[in-house]
Structures are given as C-alpha cells and as structure tokens.
Amino acid sequence: MEPENASRRQFLQASSGTLGFAWLAANWPQVAAAAAHAHTAAVEGDRSRLLFLNAAQARDVEAIAAQIVPSDDTPGAREAGVVWFVDHVHAGPWSRGGADFLAGLADFQARCARHHPGVAQFADLTSEDQLAYLQHVERTPFFEQMRFLTVLGLLASPAYGGNAGKVGWKLVGFVDQHAWQPPFGYYDAAYEGFRPYDEEAAEGRP
Amino acid sequence: MTARRFGPNDTVDFVVVGSGAAGGVMARELSRAGSSVIVLEQGPRLTAADFRHDEFAYWFELELGNRLDAKPQTFRRDASTVATAVREFPAAWYAATVGGSSTHFTGNFWRFHENDFDERSRLGPIAGTTFADWPIRYADLEPYYTKVDWEIGVSGLAGASPFDPPRSKPYPMPPLPVKSSGVLLERGARKLGLHPFPAPMAIASVPYRDRPACAHCGFCIGYGCEMRAKSSTLYTAIPEAEATGRCEVRPQSYVARIETSKAGRATGVTYFDASKRERFQKARAVVVCANGAETPRLLLMSATSKFPDGLANSSGLVGRNLMFNTYAQVHALFEHELNEYKSVQCTRVVHDWYDHDPKRGFYGGGGLDARGGPMPTVWAAFSAPPDQRWGAGYKRFLQDMPRAMLVATHGTSLALADNRIDLDPTLKDAWGLPALRMTYRDHPDDLKFARFLQERAREIMDAAGARRVWADPVVEATGSPHLLGTARMGDDPRSSVVDRFHRTHDVRNLFVCDGSSFVTSGRGQPTMTIMALAFRAGEHIARFAKRGEI
C-alpha cells in the first residue's frame, strides 16, 4: 500500500498549493504520468530471508555497516537494513562479484579471529573493539568495498532491500518527488535577481 | 506523417550511425532537406515513461550506458604498457540509447568563443602537442549555434556574460530559476570582482514548442528526462526527422563495419540487429555520428585491403588526438539549507578565466559552475572529506547534505598524438568485435590549469561565506564523457581526417560529424558545439546531395 499512498500524497501536495497553480495547470498531464509510474521504484524490497549470505556472514556485514554509519539518536545502517541490500545485490545484479566479496569477508573474519582469539566473530566484539579493529583495517580493499556497499544500502531505492522506510533519505534530507517549485533553499528564497554588468550588455549584442 | 519504415532491400540516401547530439540533428537536417535516412542506434528506444528516479540503476548499473559486461573497454596510460580491462566505470562513458548522450546530459550549453577556433594562431605552437587551428571560425558557426538555441531549445540570458562571443539572436527561453548554489557562487564571485552569469542550459525553463517546462525533479545528470523538458534529440530533432516521413530510426542496431566497394566508395553498413543477426543496409552515403570513441573504433574496424589501416585513415590520425576536458571540484558547506537535490545541475557560471593568460606560466582556459552534484548515493559515496569517511563523523557529513554544494571546474585539454582510441588486440565484445582501447595521459599544463581553477573555486566559496570548503585532489584522467578530436577537421588531408564540411578526405561519400571532428577541446562543454557542427554539416551535405556531388 505504501507506494500508492506515496503517489497519492504527491497529488494531494500538488493540488493543495505546494506548487503554483498556473504551473500545475500547464503541466498536469506530465506530472501525473511521472507520478503514475513512480510506484515501481518505491516498492520496498523483500527483507524476509537471506539469498546470498549465511547467518554468521550477515551478522558481521551488519556489524561493519553499523560502524560505518552508526545508529545514535537517529537511525543508521542497521535500521536501514543495509545487510539486506548487501545480500540481495550479490544474489542479483552483482552476482558476478559475489565470490570476491565472500573471499574478502572470509579474510576479514580470519584476521579478526587472529587479532581477538576467543571471540567467535567480529559482531561479538564490544563496539569499542569493533571500532579499533576497523581503524586497523580501514585501508584494505574489503573495508573500502564495505563502505561503498553501506552507502548504497543506506541510500539506494528501498526496492533493492536497504533504505528501509527511507531512513537513509531522511538522514540526508532527501525527498523523492516528481516536481518542485522555487524557492528550493534558503539562499535562493532571498535572491533579488540578476544585476547586469552594464545596461548595454543586458540588452544583448544583436 | 508517421515515421517511415524501409524494406530490407531499399537503398537509402543516407545511413546515419548514431542517434545522439550529432546523429539526431544530422537525421533531421538531411530528411527535412528531402533525403531518405536510416538512423542506426545500438541502444534501445526509450520514452519519458521509461525513465525512473533510481540512482542505483542509472549510476551503478548504467541502465542508459555502454555496459562493460557486453561491451568491454581497456585503458592504458601510454603505448609502452598493456591496456587492462576497465572494471567499474567506462573510460569512454556515453548513453547507448536513442538520443545518445543528449538523453542523459547535464545540458550545459556554452558556445565556444572565437579563440577556441584560432588559438594556435594567437599563441603559436606548443611543443610536444598537435595544437592547431580549426579550418572554420566562430563566425562560420554562429548561425548554427543560434539554430541550436531555437530549434533544440536553450534557456539563458543573452548579454549577461561580458565574455560571451557575439550572437545574432537572444535565447528563446529565460534562464531556469536560480538555485541556492547559484546564488552563493554569484555572491562569492561578485565579492571578488568576477562576472558570474545565468547558466545557458538545454532545458526548457518555460513550455517550449510541444514540450513542458522543467519540473525541477532533480534527476537530471545521468538520467533521461521524465518530463521531456531536457532538450535531448530524443525529444527534439529525432521526432522532427521522423515527421518528414523520410526517416527511420532503428534501435538496437549495432554497426560492425562500413562496407566499401573496390572503387573505394562506401556502399552501406553491416550491423547486428536486436537478435544479433548480421544485416546489411545499402546507402548512397554514410554519415558516422557515433561519438568521439565509437566513431574512430568503427572506422578502424572497417579496414579492407584497399584501406588496410582503417577507413578514412590515410593521415594515420583516426583515433588520435583524443581530448577530454579537465574536471575538478570543490565541496562547500553553508549554514542554511540549499537542498541541491532539487532542480537542474547548474544555474550560475563564471567565465573570467576562459582565456589563456601567459602570465600563469602554463597553457589553459576554462570556466566553473555551481552544482548540486548528483543525488544522495553518488554524493555520499564520493564527496566526504578525508577526515569524515566513516563512523560518527561520516554520519554528521551525511546529515549535512541539505547544506552542501559543489563547484565544478572545466578546462582545456591539449591535443596529443599519443592519446588515442584504437582496437584492443585481444579483448572482444559480446558480438566478437574488438574492444575499444583507450590510451590517455593528461598534458602537464592541463593538470596545472585544473589545479589553478580549483583554487579559484575555493576562493569563491570562501568569499561566499562557506563554513567549510574541501577539494578532491586533481588526478590524471582515467576516462571521460567528453570524447573529442579523434577524426579532426582540417583542410590538409595529411593532418586531418575530415574536411571543413565533414567529408572524409579519403572516401567521397563518407562523412563524420560528432565530437571526433573537434580540433581543440573548448573549455569544458562540447555538446552545444557538436550540435552546431551537425546543423552546419547537415546543411552542406544536403546541398551536396542535391547537386549530385556525393
């Protein structure tokens, strides 16, 4: 139901004066068409079962992502369901990179086990120990890859499994909408118009 | 009139290879002049309803792009090394779809200035480069720039930039509404005594002809326009060409070879259709508008015993003199919200450093513009300052997105004979054709000028009152969407591939018109000039056809 509500909200916003009436009258069919096919992108991905990672791998992926974008008074990578994105993308569009990803993860886990003997896996470390260990490996290609995947899982369309409830978009202040009207921000709202450098130039040089 | 469909045995006047900025305009001009035209486009035909707000699909899955799994590319710095396959992002980045890269472009439509055409004469030679004048001048192209403004649709404010070359008509549409990034660039630049001006953009600011105005949705650079407000050839020149009843656009038609007769004339092209079946299309003349990377690749793939080094390559210059435009950026954070994810990329431009200045001690010229940058994912992945790459600091950086903007710098690339596109000796694409190989190393002056301009961008952001400014390091290029110079235009067949009317020196009924025709790179925004060249070439080629001079 979420997607339909989203496009209906857009129409309600559009018709309740958020957008200039004249503009809307001139463009209504196009905005309607744009909003109508928007629902395909807004469907939330399935987060019911893992398609690629096993449970232990998923725990570590989630723990690493949660250090890259931590949760505090606002949601982070964990609440965004980044792990679902990482899982689904390797089962789907990036399946060809799946083996490399698992090899990188296995190496990360093995090194972590040597560093912290007696602890079953990275996810079981205290948050302080996790942070210290990631600082230790932050220049490795695997960490770089995890950072990249975390960004995508946080901010790509919810259709890919992450960005649950659009928490990533809320974090960065982004609203996915098919039409905006100026002013867009604080500074253009106060803009007084372009002052020409001299009157002759303002009239052009025909 | 509905679009024409030609039969398999029909001979058409022209086959145009590519449907982008050049190919779309070329098809329009030739078909309107009375010729029959088939446009072969390797990508699919998409419509406004196909375009979505989906960063992952467009930026990371290259939904509109030349996908590397099917069409691999290789890259190397110089000829002494073996080129390796490009893995993450194409070295030659273009949109493979009807409309070509005009479908996903930003729409920065700067005209070239007078000096872009004759700077070699003004400055003298530059050692180690193939820096040269164009065979045409700004005045030759001005009427066609004006055609682009009006026939394709450009928004802007004539006379606003004191540096602009003369123009015969104002813009047909007013500038797009200024964004906060534009206001801040203008504020900082004016404080420093510079002359920022409203960006000329190939995006409708008001309803224009049959198209609606921009809805400011923000999904612009890298995306197809779901409003049809972007002045892509997909929405402008191509439907107009089809409306003549003399033009057919064939999507998913990937050209493998231009065929030539024993007498050395082009007879048509061999291409793969959507089901990878090989087909031959007969034509009285062939016009290649496949972009500055695919055009030379196709000419090289069309070698025969008569043309052993590739078609139209007696000069040995096909694929050589590859130029990009240097690009650097500066990020800035402000106190209040800008919300740069809304609306078009650029609304203000600074051209105060457009001209070369010998006092700087190195060659170069360019411009800079205020940008929102791409949307959340690309911004978050690639824009963080080095001390806030992950953890709590990174999260604060993410939360600052509404207050962030960037300034992008655009500059000259010098032509170097060793920078080139050719055929990879081993790697093949999914059709069994040789992969595109790119060899590129920036001239040191190009990098020096990019760093110079980046410092100016930093000063402007400081003057605008930014709370924090940081710059991405300027590094050697590993590719570009601006693919220029690889079949350069000139009067002398020994030092150029096409003449001033885009006819190849070697094959009388073969024409080439796109970024490959450029002799110099310009200052950073080539598409306006590509379209102007196509309007001019189309007019001349149609005249040749009428006179029986093809």
Image: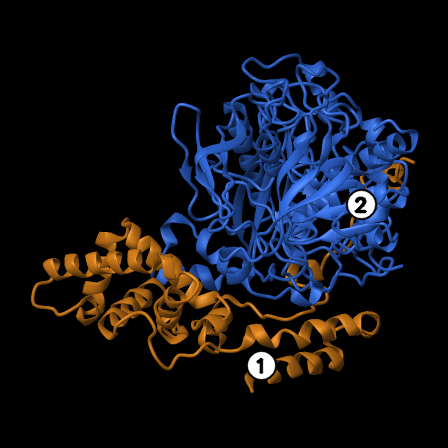
Real-space Cα separation, disc 2 to disc 1, in angstroms: 44 Å
Q: Which residue is mark 2?
A: B37
Compared across the picture, whether A160 is left or right of A132 comes to right
Where is residue B318 drawn, in percent x and y?
Answer: 61, 26
Where is residue B205 drawn, in percent x and y?
Answer: 79, 57
Which residue is pictured at 44% across the width and 24% down the height? B79
Asked whether B321 or B468 is in front, the reply is: B321
Q: Colour of chain B?
A: blue
Q: Amino acid at mark 2?
A: Val
Q: Identify the subunit bearing mark 1.
A: A
Which residue is pictured at 82% across the width and 31% down the height? B141
Query: Would you identify the image quadrant in which residue A46 lies?
Result: bottom left
Q: Colour of chain A?
A: orange
Q: How is the image coloured?
A: by chain
Which labelled disc corresponds to residue B522? Answer: none
Residue B209 vs B140, above or below: the answer is: below
Element at badge 1? helix
Image quadrant where one finds the N terminus of chain B: bottom right
- Mark 2 near mark 1, Cβ–Cβ under 8 Å? no
Which labelled disc corresponds to residue A3? Answer: 1
